[in-house]
Image (cartoon, coloured by chain):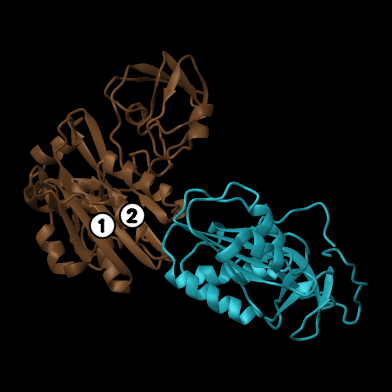
C-alpha cells in the first residue's frame, strides 16, 4: 500500500493526556484532499515492530497544506499511543496512509446531531467544517469529564457558537440522550464517537425510540486486545505464522511478509476480512463489522482486531 | 412478458406489521388498502399515538369499518390532493421515531414514499403493502411521462402514445417501472398486449 511521507511540524498538548500533531508533506507540497470524518493510519516504527493506528483528521478539508491528528495516551497502550507521545518530536518523519472516510455525513440527511465523548471529538473536527460549508442544520454535543479534558473547546466555541452544546460532567451536566433523541424532526441523522458505554447507550436509546438503523452512525476504532498465542495456517501461501499474545493476527502476518489487505485496522471497515477454513478452538470476534450471525457461523474473521483461542486456525489466503 | 428472471430493483411487498419500538405511527391507505389497515388492527396495538389517513376509492370504500375499528385516530379524505396535503403536514410535524406505513396500489405506495423521502425519510423505512391490484406505474423513457394503473405487459404511454414494453426494472426515485418503445426498430410491429398485472 503506497504511503504518504510526512514530517511533524508542530506538537501541542491540548488537554490532559492528549497531544495534537500537525503533519506537512515531506516534499513540501499539498497533501491529498479528504472529506469530513476521514482518518489516516499512522505507521509507528517502534524498535523491531511497527504499530499502525487509525487517527481522525482534525483540520478543515479545505486546507491541504497540513494534516492534524490528536492522540490520547492510552493507559493500557500496546505501544502506539506511547510511541506518539514519547518518541515523536517536531521534525520526525512518519509514513501515513492516504485518507479514508468510514464516517461521512449523510448527504440525504436534513439535520445532523453529532455526539462526542472526550477524545471522541476528533472525527467531528473535520465534519463540522463540511457542515458549515454546506449550510446543513446541525448541533454538536460535546460531553467531557472536566474542562481540563475538553480538547479543542475554545476553537469549537469560536467556530460553532450556539451550535455547540457542552456537557461538563464536573459541573453535573449529564447528556440526556433520551430527551435529545426524542425531540428531533424526521430526516435527522445522529453520529456518535466516544467511550463504549456512551456509544452503546446512544444506539440503544435510538433503537428504543424507533430510529431506523440507517440514521444512526458511529465510528469506533478498536485496539487489538491481547490473548493467547496460536498459529495461523495459510492454505494458499502454504505458510505457518505464529501469533504472539500481544500481537494481532494482521501484525503477525505482516511481520511474516504476508500481504494482507487492510484499511482501518480497528475492526470497523471490513477490508481485511478473511475466510476461516478450520480451527481446533474458538474464534474471538472483537470487530464491529461482522453481523452476529456471521460471527456465530465462524466462517469469517477480521484479523486486525480478532483472534482465536486455539492451537491453530486455517485461513484461505 | 418476462419469465424466469428477476431484477433486483423489483420491489417485494409484505403484510404490514406494527413496529413496536417507536414514538408514533402514521398509516396511509387508499381503496383496498383500507382492508390492510383493518388487518393490521387485528395485531396487538402499539402504545404510541397512531394516525390513519384514508382515501376511499370507487367500489373500494372501507370507511365504515375503519371508523368502527380505528375510531378518532382516523381521518378520511374526499380526494387525493387533500390527503397528500395532510400527509405533508403530518410529516412536517413528525419526530424521528415516527413509523410510516402505506397500503394501496403501487402508484399510491410510491407517491407516499416519495413525499416521505422529501422529508428525509429513507425509502426502505416506509413499510408498504400492496393488498390487491398488481397494476403498475410505468415511466416512459422517451417522453418522461408516468402512466398509472398499467395492467398489461405492453401499454400506450399517456404522454406520447408510444407503445411501451413494461419492464420489471423499477426506480425508487421515480416510483415507477421502466417502459420503453416496443416497436422502435420495426415501426408498427406491436405484439398483442396481455393482461399480466391484473
Identify the disc placed on residue B106: none
Foreground pick, B108 / A24: B108
Where residue B74 appears, as percent x and y from the top left, is: 59, 67
Mark 2 Cα shell of 10 Å, populated few (<14), some (14-19), many (≥20): many
Q: Is residue A111 above or below residue A142?
A: below
Foreground pick, B142 / A5: B142
The residue beneath circle 1 is A124
Q: Are marks 2 and 1 on the same chain?
A: yes
Foreground pick, A303 / A175: A175
Where residue B105 appears, as percent x and y from the top left, is: 71, 67
Q: Is residue B12 above or below residue B86?
A: above
> What secondary structure is marked by label 2?
strand
The CA span between labels 2 and 1 is: 9 Å
- Who's the residue at 36% across and 66% down the image? A111
Specify which label sits upstream in the sequence, 2 or 1.
Answer: 1
Residue B105 visible in the current orientation: no
Mark 1 Cα shell of 10 Å, populated few (<14), some (14-19), many (≥20): many
Seen in the image, is B36 located left or right of residue A26? right
- Who's the residue at 36% across and 62% down the image? A184
Q: Which chain is cyan?
A: B
> What secondary structure is marked by label 1?
helix
Seen in the image, is B64 located left or right of residue A299? right
- Who's the residue at 78% across and 64% down the image? B133
Labelled pair 2, 1 in contact (Cβ < 8 Å): yes
Residue B120 visible in the current orientation: yes
Question: Badge 1 sits on which subunit?
Answer: A
The residue beneath circle 2 is A191
Report which colour depicts chain A: brown
Where residue B159 appears, as percent x and y from the top left, is: 74, 85
Amino acid at each position: 500500500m503506497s504511503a504518504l511521507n510526512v514530517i511533524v511540524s508542530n506538537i501541542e498538548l491540548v488537554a490532559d493526556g492528549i497531544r495534537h500533531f500537525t503533519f506537512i508533506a515531506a516534499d513540501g507540497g499539498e497533501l491529498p484532499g479528504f472529506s469530513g470524518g476521514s482518518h489516516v493510519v499512522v505507521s509507528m516504527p517502534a524498535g523491531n515492530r511497527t504499530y499502525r493506528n487509525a487517527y481522525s483528521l482534525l483540520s478543515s478539508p479545505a486546507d491541504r497544506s497540513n494534516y492534524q491528528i490528536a492522540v490520547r495516551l492510552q493507559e493500557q497502550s500496546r505501544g502506539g499511543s506511547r510511541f506518539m507521545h514519547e518518541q515523536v518530536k517536531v521534525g520526525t518523519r512518519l509514513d501515513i496512509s492516504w485518507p479514508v472516510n468510514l464516517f461521512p455525513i449523510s448527504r440525504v440527511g436534513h439535520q445532523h446531531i453529532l455526539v462526542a465523548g472526550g477524545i471522541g471529538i476528533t472525527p467531528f473536527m473535520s465534519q463540522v467544517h463540511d457542515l458549515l460549508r454546506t449550510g446543513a442544520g446541525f448541533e454538536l454535543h460535546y460531553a467531557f469529564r472536566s474542562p481540563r479534558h475538553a480538547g479543542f473547546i475554545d476553537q469549537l466555541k469560536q467556530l460553532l457558537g450556539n451550535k455547540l452544546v457542552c456537557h461538563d460532567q464536573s459541573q453535573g451536566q449529564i447528556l440526556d440522550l433520551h430527551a435529545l433523541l426524542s425531540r428531533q424532526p424526521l430526516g435527522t441523522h445522529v453520529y456518535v464517537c466516544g467511550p463504549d458505554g456512551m456509544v452503546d447507550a446512544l444506539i440503544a436509546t435510538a433503537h428504543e425510540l424507533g430510529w431506523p438503523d440507517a440514521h444512526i452512525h458511529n465510528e469506533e476504532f478498536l485496539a487489538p486486545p491481547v490473548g493467547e498465542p496460536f498459529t495461523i495456517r495459510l492454505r494458499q501461501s502454504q505458510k505457518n505464522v505464529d501469533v504472539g499474545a500481544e500481537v494481532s493476527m494482521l501484525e503477525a502476518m505482516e511481520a511474516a511478509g504476508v500481504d494482507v489487505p487492510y484499511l482501518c485496522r480497528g475492526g470497523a471497515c471490513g477490508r481485511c476480512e478473511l475466510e476461516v477454513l478450520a480451527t481446533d478452538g474458538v474464534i474471538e470476534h472483537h470487530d464491529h463489522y461482522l453481523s452476529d450471525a456471521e460471527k456465530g457461523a465462524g466462517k469469517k474473521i477480521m484479523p486486525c482486531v480478532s483472534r482465536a483461542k486455539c492451537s491453530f486456525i486455517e485461513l484461505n489466503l | 412478458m418476462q419469465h424466469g428472471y428477476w431484477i433486483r430493483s423489483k420491489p417485494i411487498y409484505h403484510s404490514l406489521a406494527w413496529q413496536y419500538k417507536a414514538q408514533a405511527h402514521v398509516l396511509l391507505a387508499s381503496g383496498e388498502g383500507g382492508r390492510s389497515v383493518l388487518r393490521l388492527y387485528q395485531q396487538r396495538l402499539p402504545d404510541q399515538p397512531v394516525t390513519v389517513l384514508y382515501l376511499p376509492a370507487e367500489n373500494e370504500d372501507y370507511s365504515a369499518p375503519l371508523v368502527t375499528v380505528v375510531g378518532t385516530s382516523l381521518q378520511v379524505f374526499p380526494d387525493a390532493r387533500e390527503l397528500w396535503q395532510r400527509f405533508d403536514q403530518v410529516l412536517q410535524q413528525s419526530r424521528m421515531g415516527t413509523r410510516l406505513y402505506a397500503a394501496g396500489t403501487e402508484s399510491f405506495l410510491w407517491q407516499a414514499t416519495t413525499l416521505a423521502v422529501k422529508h428525509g425519510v429513507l425509502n426502505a423505512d416506509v413499510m408498504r403493502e400492496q393488498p390487491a391490484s398488481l397494476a403498475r406505474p410505468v415511466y416512459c423513457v422517451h417522453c418522461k411521462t408516468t402512466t398509472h394503473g398499467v395492467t398489461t405487459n405492453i401499454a400506450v404511454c399517456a404522454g406520447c402514445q408510444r407503445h411501451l414494453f413494461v419492464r420489471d426494472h423499477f426506480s425508487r426515485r421515480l416510483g415507477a417501472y421502466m417502459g420503453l418503445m416496443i416497436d422502435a426498430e420495426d415501426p408498427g410491429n406491436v405484439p398483442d398486449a396481455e393482461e399480466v398485472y391484473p
